[in-house]
Image: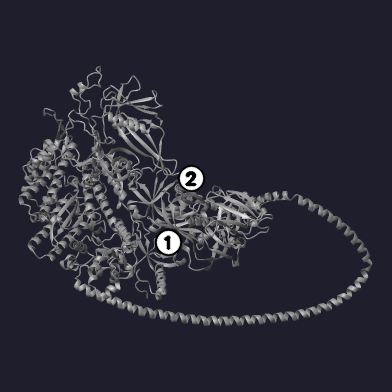
Amino acid sequence: FAPPYTASRPAHPCFRLPRVLVFAAMEVTTKMRIGDPVWLRGAKKGGEPFELGQVTNVQQNGARVTVADASGAERAFDAANADVFPANPAGSTAPDHCGLIHLNEPSILENSRARYASDDIYTYTGKILIALNPFANLSSSIYSEETMAKYKDKDVGARGAEPHVYAMGEAAYKHVKRNKTPAAIIMSGESGAGKTETTKHIMRYLAWRSESVSKKAEGKLDTLADAILGTNPLLEAFGNAKTVRNNNSSRFGKMMRLHFEPSGAVAGAYIKTYLLEKSRAVAITDPERNYHIFYQLCAAGPAEDKGSLLASLKPTDLNMLNQSKCIELKGKSDAKDYAETVQAMDTLGIPKKEQSELFRVLSALLLLGNIKFTDDANDKAVFDEQLGKGDFCKAAEELLACGALSKNLTSKVMKGKEKPDGRRSIYTIAYSAKQAGAVRDAVVKSIYTHLFDWIVEKVNTFIAGNESTPSLPYVGLLDIFGFENFAHNSFEQLCINFANEKLQQFFLTQVFKEEEVLHVKEGVPWKEVEYQDNTPCIELMEKPPNGIFRLLDSQCKAPKASEEALCEQVNETHKKGGFLAPTRLKRMRDGEGFIVRHYAGDVVYETSTVIGKATKVSEVSLLEKNNDTLQEDWLEQLAGSEVPLLKSLFSPGWEAALKAKKSASFSSVGKRFVNDLNSLLDELKASKAHFVRCIKPNSKQVKKEFEPAMVLDQLRCSGVVEAVRVMTEAYPTRIPYEVIHGRYAPLMGKEVLDATGDEPAAFCEAIAIACDVAPGDFALGLTKLFLKVGCGVFLEDLASMDTAVVVPLLVAKIAESKRKKGAEKVIGNAVYGWFLRKRYKEKRAAAALAQHRMRTLKARREYQKWSKERQERLKREAAERTKKEAEEKAMREAEAEARRKAEAEASANKKKADEKAVAAAVAKAKAEAEARVAAEMAEAEARVAAEMAENEARNAAKQKLDRKRSDSNVFGSQPMVEATLASPRGRAGSTTRRPSFFDAASNANLTEALTEAQKEKEAEKVAGGGIDGTMSLEKASSNHAVKKEEYFDVLIIRDVGKGTLGIAVDLWDGEVTVGAITTGGPADREGTLVQGDVIKGVDGCPCNTIEEVTGMVQKAPKDIRLSICRRPVSVVLESMIRMRMPSGEWEPFAFRLLSNRNIEFEKLSPPVYAGEIHARLAQSLKLVEERGGDKVLEIVTGHKHFQIKCETMLELETWQLRLQEVIMLQEKVANVAHGWLLKEEPAQSGSGTQFKHYWFVLFSNGILMYFADMQRAVLGQALGFIPVENCVEETRNASMHTISIKCSFKTWLLATKSKESMLQWAASLKVAAPSDASAKPAIDAVLAQGWCDLPRDTPEGEVWARHWFVLKSSALQIYPEEQKKAAAKGPLGEPSASLQSTAMKTATRAQGADFYKWGIVVETTDGTLLRMRATGQSEMRHLLSTLNVNCIPTEVAAPGTREAVATLTEQLKAGYLYKRAETRKAKPWGQRWFVLEVMTDAGPEEGTVVRTGQLTYFNNSKDAAIKKSPTVIHLKDATKVQTALGKTHKTEHRVLLSTPDRESGLMELGHGDKEVADDWAKLLLFWIGPPKVAQGSIGGEAKVVRSAWMEVKWEAHRAAELTDDDLARSETISKSSPSFARSFFRKKKEEAEPATKPSRASVEASPPPLGADGTEGAEDAGADEEQTFAWAYVALLSEPGSGGGLTLRQYTDEAMTTEVGRLQLGYRVQAAVLDDPIEDYETAFRVVPDGKASDTWLLCPGSDAASADWIATIMPSA
């Protein structure tokens, strides 16, 4: 009966009870019931991934279920830690995966299978379309115009419109027409999934849609639409080929933009292509084919175009086609396709003459492919004429009409440097046969690529529309190559898979990241979904400076480049990354290739040598494929062809080569592809993206066959499963408030506006409720109305409907809603009245029943009273009778006594005499006793000292007894609570034994209860290890919780008579409870007992203490029955905490301390997982303080240290107290002292302190606790504790005696009014010693166990084999499947592999394809990786959480130690200086490259840093770049810096540095420029002496304005050349000096000094990439250094001390810890693009700082937009 509920309207009181019932019902429905169908993981590897089962039994309130599989075999599962998925009803399907009743992987897979079987190949996932390739021509009606009409003006998921690709086209079309902004439809999937066909259908729909809108110029419109559709056969002919996975695979990517006019009519189109696989034109593998056009030409091409020689040949005679046995495709006619290709060219308006020239050039390429070469005696290439098929070279020359080809095929011409007189040397170099073949292939690939580009240009020219078309909004159709993983992969697959990684990242960003950002920003609830972020894989491939593409470019530029060096460099650089697998997995060497872990699987990229050996076909190397440069000789020859088409293709390139200053040797294909791809992604981000995920249902490419494992992998890798979770949890449909409110609110009546107010959110909420949208299906954001999938169809239609129709409808809907609310109120009141009447009747009946029972009780009590009185009366009468009889008996006895007295009178006198003698003896004894008492009083102090020694001895004896008892425990493990010693007389607090905190009776006779044979049996079990001898904590899980108290009996059969039960017992809250269960023991095999169960009796006898239980167990037979009470597990303490992970990061967790003494945790940040920390493993607690003052609670176990911290100190202390109580149960502690004491606390008034009474208990482990009273102490409800580390007693006055107790984290002040009591407490506190955690035995418990898959190397490659794992606190043990099955229930024996917990470093979820196969990677301390695959997602999360939380050690810093901080190195200045030689044997002056650096470290105090200067010099700048042979001078040891003048040229201005560590004590430096020398002297003077200590933080002085990786070239400043006149007038040159060369650098005379000297920029040079070696006495060793571009992380910083100016710096990494170059820009800095761009660096720009002697930098960010942004950022500082 619950009404719609929103945040703005509270619920009616009458619905409170029904809502509780609804929630309870929801909880019940999530539980599995007997008979429910479920999905289980497939048992057979490689078979069905899931199999159907049925629940046959439910235990522990659904925590454990028993499932029968298809064969009838039953298996039990832990519902929380096993993948058991609810199944949907048989035969149920849904057009949208989000509409399934149960959403899980097997349900999605089964829904896809069922729809595919009924030819429903399209299925929605929210607004994502899933398309399965049918591999057949479906019914024509599915793609007819009648079907298209069904989707016109319909939204995705609209009622009556089944899932279809037309719906995606309509959504994109409506977006462009309505919003006038671009839209994109992205087809993705692996090769053969049907992306190209899907693109065709969308193009047809958009063409039909535009025709249905515009009726003007129909002829033109039809022609343009036909032309757009006609592009497909032509582009497929030249760009598609058969591959292993697809008969019509696109070997290029394309983005087609369909521009639309405002009316909705198509205005034009444009096609952008990406990366044609040009190597396919010359090399193919079996059973693939070359491009379709070659086969079409051979099948139906005109003979006059092919030439006589080619016309006489078959495809099997052509080398470019016969490398594969596949020549013809089944069901495909090449002749028919040729006709369609020609028809497409006719449609595009390509003249017949150009068509003939096109086929003529293609024919020449086929002939060129048949040319063979051999080596002559001089290893020079000559033509091989042994084929007998004619002169292929001559025939090709005739078709190309560009002259003789033989010369350029067998040799190349090298031109020397042009001399001043215009002459140059020319050399002819002959090729070898192998080199000639490579040149032939390069020419064929270049010509074919130019032809393909020409075709695309022709298509674009015809379909472009008018001049305004490019500015119109468009629908982009992206059909790009699918993910590829062949037997041998090379450069093309690297680029293709990189493109798929980028598109996968874009999909993840759109579906996950942006969804999260939008929900959080709008204040709408969002639940995080775990998914694989492939950003690290993309960075592995493209990120500077060590991405694969970057390393490939660098290797191509290297002098001795090779594929082997590239592969070795890639493997070495990224060997520790998670997305590059070690080559040993494929039995390869590092130089033979590399393995990338892509999101869709691991791909092996091999060198051409490896591929050539495997395929027996010559393969082009990676380096050559990355180089797109054709020799100038070929450019010249092809540009001079008499074929107009061929000439037009190569003339632009030849003209550009003539203009270039030097011939290009390298043009990076990879770099150009990466830049094009990034531009494509920028375009997609600016558009409204729609996704079509194409799925390949089987690998055989046959219809009606569904391979579930293959489909499941694609669904996982494509993100569909995660998208389902997002769509169900999130609100994918959003409508801005202004769309609804702004349009309809002004048109509504006053009554409607009064009801909703002027708030847009309230108005939209009212409309949503009026339109029957359920409250849970929409949410109100800040600016938008958020709706669940498919719930806002009506609201979305409002935006496109006419207001004249909508307003009356809305008014009617709102009126209807108001009527419903009125009726709801009436019904609600009626229901509420019914509920009240029912409750009244129930109360009345309950009252009558209570009265009846009270009257019955009263009558019973009266009867009992009467019965009691009657019994008392009868007792009195019986007593009177007894008394009378006794009196008569006494009278008789008196008479007899009188007679006896007479007889004994004679002896009476003798007796009196004896009594007198006795009295004398007593008097004497009394005197002796008084003397003894006096002696005892004198020895009182001695007795007190003796008492102390006696207490300690008694404790030692008790601990010895406890150990003896633990060795003979019949439960198989030591009890967690031991007997508490009674307080001896004279101790503090009491002289009698009182109930203590841990009270249990002693069991001294326990040892004798076990025979020697039983002890031997126990030793065998412990020695067995593994499962049988280890305490298990798996049964401690809180998943076994019950909702109410349960009582039941458990029958346990022991291994031997009077043997162990395999359990450990504790005394908890006064009851005997199960503390732990030994794995493989009798109790574990029985399987019912769990931790926390209370033992109420044994074999029918009630037991209340451990001793009673133990005694009954000893007396019981082999089969023993325990009476158990199981109570609900409750939460004792719950908090949000942060825990330090093994990586050192603090992660958020939800921590709950349960009543069964376990800590339940749930990780709140991805990857999300949950688990338990078993408190019984804890040994001690430590409260430490980390740097910054934060308090951290450290939980110490035998194998790991946990560190947690809370938001407040109070919360942390509460956790410390509660955990300490749990730990006390695990220790053998005795009550040393207890009693009432006063404790100092803050006064309740808030000022001052006060003393309060508490009950204190001191334990033998040095822990002092206090309680509210003695009863609380018995229950263990402490208020606080302190480890006693130091105590000091003090007497303040006669009535106040205090004791101060201190530990590392707190201090207590206790008081008592009795001095004697104070002295006794002080003595006890000093005697009690804190427990030593290291001395306690660690419990090696089994934390988890189960099946997993591990990789194994075989000759065929890597194979995953099944293993059994046992995860203990100390180690992870692995057993083969055969060993586990052979052992059955017995001991497993020695494991095949064991990994100690101390050797584990990290445990993370695997990346790449293993991510979706529940892979885990455990990294060891020595760098070894252990890869595992769990059997399911739940098992993976459980194992991952257990490893991270319970096993992997966390680095714990010692208390008070400071965290290590990385040293920051800054380069202040660098440049050439002359240095005077220190020995006479060397030349007096030598030029060296000097570098002044400053190292910044953390200071001695918080918030301080220490800076130290260092001067280093090298032989030259090249050595400086690689840090070769440095000489370091520590400026902290230098004492003095002076300047001086000299006479030697270029050293006139001297800098003298005094250094005590040098022989001469003085270093003399020189430079020819006074300004440069003074600057060096000024900097050195500042940095000599002690290190500089200053306030601040490392890296905190400058603010980063902009930073990025880019390629940098350093251009050193060059001074003007000295003229003869200047040399003659020089006064600084000695006359005796020899003549000087003209290379002296000096300012030109014509460059006058400015009147006002500008501020000089301290160009402290960057790391020069290359340079010439300097020698002693050289005038300028760096003058002729050749500079090149090098990668660096460039940062633009704004420094506080530079007056607002900017500084450019170069670093070696993104952390900016090591600076290698600096350029201070100054106020008149200039930044502009290059006037003459450098090839491959066209986007570079030059930065010229302010200063007359400044160096300049060339920066190349990688794109024109980035260069423009950098220039715009730098220039405003001028």
Identify the residue under disc 1. 80
Q: Residue 1554 lies in what quarter of the image? A: top left
Q: Amino acid at mark 2?
A: Gly
Residue highlighted by disc 2? 1456
N-terminal of the two: label 2 or label 1? 1
**Foreground label between 2 and 1:** 2
Q: Residues within 10 Å of mark 1 (few under 14, many from 20)?
A: some
Image coords of residue 1303 (percent x, y): 55, 49
Q: Real-space Cα distance between discs 2 and 1? A: 42 Å
Q: Nearer the viewer, residue 6 or 272?
A: 6
Name the one closer to the observer, 98 or 1325: 1325
Label 1: which secondary element: loop
Quarter in which the C terminus is drawn: top left
Is residue 1524 at all visible to an observer of this figure? no
- The way the protein has been coloured in the rendering is one colour
User: Which x, y percent locates residue 916?
Assistant: 90, 60
Please identify the residue farthest to the right as the structure is shown.
Answer: 906
Depth check, front residue: 1469 or 830? 1469
Q: Left of 1568 or right of it: where is 321?
A: left
Foreground pick, 718 / 862: 862
- The image quadrant that residue 1412 belongs to is bottom left
Q: Position of residue 1110 (x, y in %)?
A: 61, 60
